[in-house]
Amino acid sequence: MSQVVGFFIYDEFQTVDLAGPLDAFAVANDLLAPELGYQLTTLAGDATPVRSESGLRTMADTTLANCAKVDTLVVIGGRGCQAVIADQDQMAQLRRLAGNCKRVVSICTGAFVVAAMWPNRALKLATHWDFANKLAMQFPHIVVESDKLFVQSEEVYSSGGLTAGIDLALSLIAQDHGSTLAQRVAQYMVMYVRRSGDQRQYSSLLSVQQTLSQRFQSSIEFIQNNIDKPLSLEMLADEASLSPRHFRRVFKDKVGVSPMRFVQRLRLEKAKDLLCNSELSVVQISSRIGFGSPSLLTRKFTQEYGVNPTQYRENFTMEIK
C-alpha cells in the first residue's frame, strides 16, 4: 500500500533540505512496485510561488488547507521557519495534518516549527549544530540533540541540516521497505547508507582546532595526516619544535586532553566512522587508523564505548537513534 509523503515548504526554505530527502524517496519509487511506492507532494501556505533561500522559485503541488491527509509530514528547514511559527493559520493546519499522520519529520531548522507545534511535549529533536543553542533557548520544553545526525522521539523524527536529511530519509525507507532497498537507493545516489543517527554531525575533537594557535593547529593536522602511522609524544613534540614535556603540558592545557589521549580518541572516532560508513573488516580498520592489531582496537574501543566494534556496527547500522 502506497504512502503519501507531504513536504512543507515556505518562503526562504533551504533547497537541499527539500531536494535531498525528496530525491531519496523518488529513487525508492523507481525500485518499488507502484502500489508500494510513495506519493510525493509539496505543500505550502498558499497557492503562490515559494522562493528558497538560494532564490529558486517553485510552486507547491497544493496548499496546507487543501491537503486532507498525509502519512508522513516533512517540515523543511530554512531561514523562513520563524515566519511560519508566527503564522497562526499555517501552524493550525500543520497541527491538523500532524495529528492524523503516521510520522512527522523535520529537516534542519524545521525542528523549530515542530517544537512550536507541540509546546507541551518534551520531544527530543535534532537540528543543524549551528542552531542547536537557539532551538534550546527558544523552546526550553524540548531536549535538543545538538550533534546527532538524526533522532526519533515517539512518532517525531528530526535530523541535522543538509545531507543529514538524506540519511534520515534512507533510514525511513529502510524502516518501511527494508535495508536492502535503502542500500540500493544510497548506491544510486552515490552515497553511503550506513550513517546512523548516533553519528556526530562534526568531530568535537577537531572542532577545538579553530581556537588554537597555528602551532597546535599544525600539530592536529599532522596527527590527522599520519593517523595510520605509529605516533609518539616525542614525534609530535619534535614536529611542534618543543620539548616533549613542554608540548604535553601546553597541549593538554589548550585542548583539554593529553596529546596521546587525543590521538587515541581521534583514532576511535575514525573507527566509528569506518564501521558505519564502509565494509572494511575490523582488521582492515585497525591498520588504517594506526592501531597495531585488531585486538588492541577491540580492547580500546570497548573501554571507550562499552561495546566492541562488531557489536557497534550491528547495533547502529541503519538504526534510528
Image: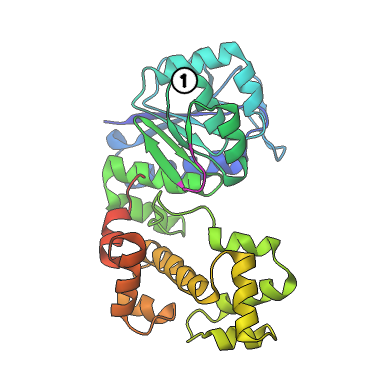
Q: Main secondary structure of the magenta part?
A: loop
Amino acid residing under circle 1 = Trp
User: Residue 251 in the image: x percent, y percent?
Assistant: 62, 72
Q: Along the horizontal axis of the image, is 236 left or right of 185? A: right
User: Which residue is more in the foreground, 32 or 279?
Assistant: 279
Location of mark 1 (residue): 118
User: The C terminus lies in which quarter of the figure?
Assistant: top left
Residue at x-position 64% and y-position 88%: 238
Q: Position of residue 55 (x, y in %)?
A: 72, 37
183 is higher (above) or lower (below) than 36 = below
Residue 144: percent from left, percent from top: 49, 37
Q: In this image, 246 relative to 152: left or right? A: right
Task: Give how far across and how far down residue 159 sits, in percent.
Answer: 48, 41
Label 1: how many Cα within 10 Å (few below 14, some 14–19, many 20+): few
Left or right position of 150 against 83: left
Q: What count of labels does the image hold?
A: 1
Rendered image coloring scheme: rainbow
Is 273 covered by the magenta stretch? no
Quadrant of the image containing the N terminus? top left
Q: Secondary structure at mark 1?
A: loop
Q: Which one is in front, 32 or 317?
A: 317
Determine the image quadrant of residue 186: bottom left
Region of the chain picked out in magenta, as a range = 144-149
Residue 41 or residue 270, whichever sits in front: 270
The answer to which image quadrant residue 195 occupies is bottom left
